[in-house]
Image (cartoon, rainbow, N blue to C red):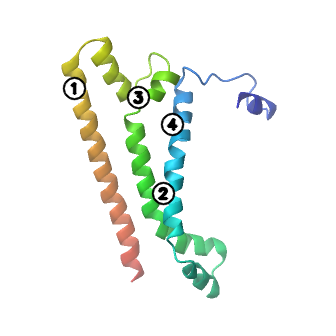
Amino acid sequence: MNSLMIALRVYDQPVRYMWDIKGVVILLVYIGTPYIVLSLLDSIERINPFLVEAARNVGANRWTAFWKIVFPLSTPGLYAGLVIVFSLNFAAFAVPLMIGDSNTQMIGLVIYREALLNNDLPFASALSVIMVSVNALLILGMSALAGRLILSRLEAKR
């Protein structure tokens, strides 16, 4: 990646990805992408192709047919993929441990350090409960928001 960026003259010297938060973020995105792609693929495969064809027959171009038909019908798959990736990355442990530096502050690593390195099991367990609670609340909030957005779009079409 550094060689390509230097060849394209995006930057002059190599950027350090190992033992840095940039590498952690890039790897978490790389790991999470298949989950979103697979859930979107399943959602898009379930869309009746005659709906897009009907939109095209009444004068919609491809872009309009995508935004008015395909995208709204694939939002449940997008939401499912986002929830899966969020849940996996919220408590990421192995990637930040191996790629990040010793000061990487991600909740999974903080719990690990408190439990095993500092031998503070009560604090680590309290952090774990807080992490699970915050994760559940955020997923419930995302679910309510996505439900309102999706239902409001469907109710407005009637």
CA separation in Å, label 4 and label 2: 17 Å
Precedes in sequence: disc 4 or disc 2: 4
The kind of residue tagged 3 is: Phe
| Residue occupied by mark 1 | 125
Precedes in sequence: disc 3 or disc 2: 2
Precedes in sequence: disc 1 or disc 4: 4
CA separation in Å, label 3 and label 4: 11 Å
| Residue occupied by mark 4 | 28
The disc at residue 93 is 3
Q: Up-down: is 51 above or below 43?
A: below
Q: What x and y, as percent, mark residue 142?
A: 34, 53
- Quadrant placement of the C terminus: bottom left
Residue drawn at 48 percent across, 69 percent down: 72
The kind of residue tagged 1 is: Ser
The secondary element bearing badge 1 is classed as helix
Answer whether labels 1 and 3 touch (C-beta < 8 Å): no
Residue drawn at 32 percent across, 12 percent down: 117
CA separation in Å, label 1 and label 3: 15 Å
Q: Up-down: is 64 above or below 137?
A: below
CA separation in Å, label 1 and label 2: 33 Å
The secondary element bearing badge 3 is classed as loop
Q: Residues within 10 Å of mark 4 (few under 14, many from 20)?
A: some
Choose top left, top right, bottom left or bottom right for residue 91: top left
Viewer-side residue, 143 vs 48: 48
Q: What x and y, as percent, mark residue 62?
A: 65, 74
Choose top left, top right, bottom left or bottom right for residue 132: top left
